[in-house]
Image: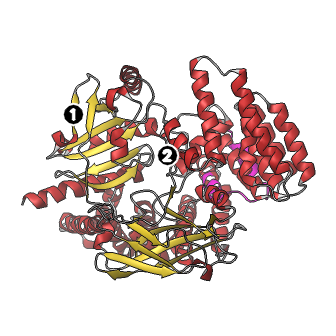
Amino acid sequence: MLSTEGKDIPRSAKKVVFEMRRVGVGIGLCLVLVVACPRFGDVPIVFSSSPAKPTADDRLTIRYVPEASHSPLVRSERVEFRFTLVGPGKELYTDVLPMVRKGGEWRVRLRPSDFLRPNPVVMVCSFLDSEDPEICDSNQGDPWVLQFYEEGKLARGAEFRLYQLSKSNFGMPTVVGTPTGAGRGARGLDAELAAHPDFLPAREARWLSILEEARENSGVSDSLRLAIGGELDAVFDRNLRSEDPDTMVAPLLAVYETIGEAAKAESLLAQIRLRFPGSRFVARCAFHWAYAPDDLEPALSRLGDFVKDDPDSPEAEQARNLLFMIYDNVMQTPEKAGELVLGGKPIGRGHLERYAEILVAAGDMEGAEAIARRCVREAEDDEWSGSGLLTPMEWERKREEELRGYTVLLARILGERNVYDEAAALLEPLVEAMARAGDREGLGDLAEYQNKLGKKADALLTYERLGESAHASDEDLRVWRSLYVDVKGSDSGFDDRLAMLEERRRANQHRQLEKRALDWPAPNVTLTDLDGRLHALEDFRGKVVLLDFWATWCGPCLNSLPKVEEFLQSIDAREEVAVLAINTWERGTPDERRAMVEEKWAELGLSLPVYLDLGASGEETSPAAEQFRVPFIPTLFVIDREGRILFRRGGLYDEGDREDLRLKIDYALSRGARAAS
């Protein structure tokens, strides 16, 4: 679901894409290349494989040590090995295998060629709790990547496959993102390029980093433009002469516009169309060129032309999705968004759901019902492709979750139209699923419809399921109490019943959190306040600590920070909780960073304690973020009174995020109370 509420509106189509990817996808993690890892001293490496340079026909032994990774999987009775294989022809295969415990290790053996032919060139893997897939260890944030070798050399196409994987969600709690330095600026990009000099995403990111830095200083020189242009020319010339062009180069067309060579890109695109007519390479190049402009008007024009010229390509669906976001979030023209939805071509179901909500807000309940039914119908008609980035079980779980959400939306629209019998009939089979998901609104809607249909006893039971699975709203409590009086004759016993359900809910939630808690020792980092004083994290021992890593240039961070402050003010035990906003991944000297933070804090009107994550001697490093292995920003850490990291999550954007954090803070507080008693 997309909304303009509380978000900065980007100024261009390209920036919209960037922001949507960062917020909607979750902001990517850096990929890590892995070889077989021995023990260093007394510290066991948490993951190893044998042999060191595997070929697809080898039988690999995968070893995993959850205790060494401070993983909650150390408490698991059964662990599964989850892997995705990618073949030279872009084939994807995902599966899970049970692991066998050998002492403190879990082991599994497999021959990749048994699962995917032709031989795979790369495997991404992680470790899961067999009963609770939300408990996942991918080495504290970075999914492991094994590359396969042929005759001692890296299998052909492996770098390209890494790029393809970097754009995909693996159905794990983490998201695999483009490996361009993990947000660590030029230093990270230099390291990436040193390891993979021909890895085009890293080269592109490095060019853009250099150009941005040049603009901030004295402007971009002609020699720099020529140097980057020469590299671009060589990349595209090589692909034009190839029989099998590398589609990874498609995004590089936009760099021509960045260096003021738009005419060269237009010429290249024309040559690509002639050389590879009707190919996926042409579609990808045309799509990436379509949203290259920084100005909104030409970007919209190009995207519109692309959708008309190539309406049936997978890239055309991406373009329609992008156009929908621009019309909805930036231009706020729902009629244009509606034209895309009603045009008869595929578009993301998330956008269909959003358009149904737009119609509800406009009072067009009949139109909203039609779109909601389309969402339900498309989700019901989905079929597993037989391969891809999800296992059959993961795919089915995802499909059921989406179908539940669309059904709840449809039922709500029917309720607004007073069609209570069908609305209740849609929701009644979903009671258990809604209770497991803590779907307060869905259960509340069902109880309301049952009540209106005169099924008061059923409505009372539904409210009880709501009370033991989610935090009931004040309105739910008011209606629930009134219904209880209607059924029982008075409200005698209602408060006791409510307290019992609340205690049961908290106990269930705490049991789940107990199993999922990371329980890692927090590094005793040193932070600098705005007056230049140093503070150690241990200074806050005895309180539950919430760390919020952020930066002044990070749009999602600036969206989340005010909600973090509101959250702190809303909890009853706020005197027992310390919230530390840690400015990280920032450029400039300490004085320059201090000035930027003070300006941003005043602009946001925040009163949270704010600290700088400074390296030694004012270096542009972020030691606290490195020690906490921060994968992206904003990242929040919940630390208990004893200095143990319990949970890590992204920023706060909606009520669901706030409720999740509230549960985790409550758990951390109760954990301390139990230890004290």
Q: Position of residue 584 (x, y in %)?
A: 39, 36
Callout 2 amino acid? Ala
Residue 114 is at least partly visible in this image: yes
Marks 1 and 2, how far apart in space?
Answer: 26 Å
Mark 1 vs 2: CB contact within 8 A:
no
Q: Secondary structure at mark 1?
A: strand
Asked whether 289 falls inside the magenta stretch, the response is no
* Spot occupied by residue 170 in the image (x, y as percentages of width and height): 54, 64
Residue 326 image position (x, y, % from top left): 67, 41
- Residue 340 magenta: yes
Residue 434 appears in the figure: no
- Disc 1 crowd rating (10 Å Cα; few below 14, some 14-19, many 20+) is some
Magenta span covers which residues? 332-354
Residue beneath disc 2: 182
What residue is pinned by disc 1? 535
Q: Tell me how many marks there are.
A: 2
Furthest residue to the front?
A: 152
Q: Closer to the camera, 155 or 327? A: 155
Could you say which disc has been placed on residue 474 in the image? Answer: none
Examine the image and state in which quarter residue 315 appears: bottom right
Comparing 546 with 121, the one in front is 121
Q: Quadrant of residue 437?
A: bottom left
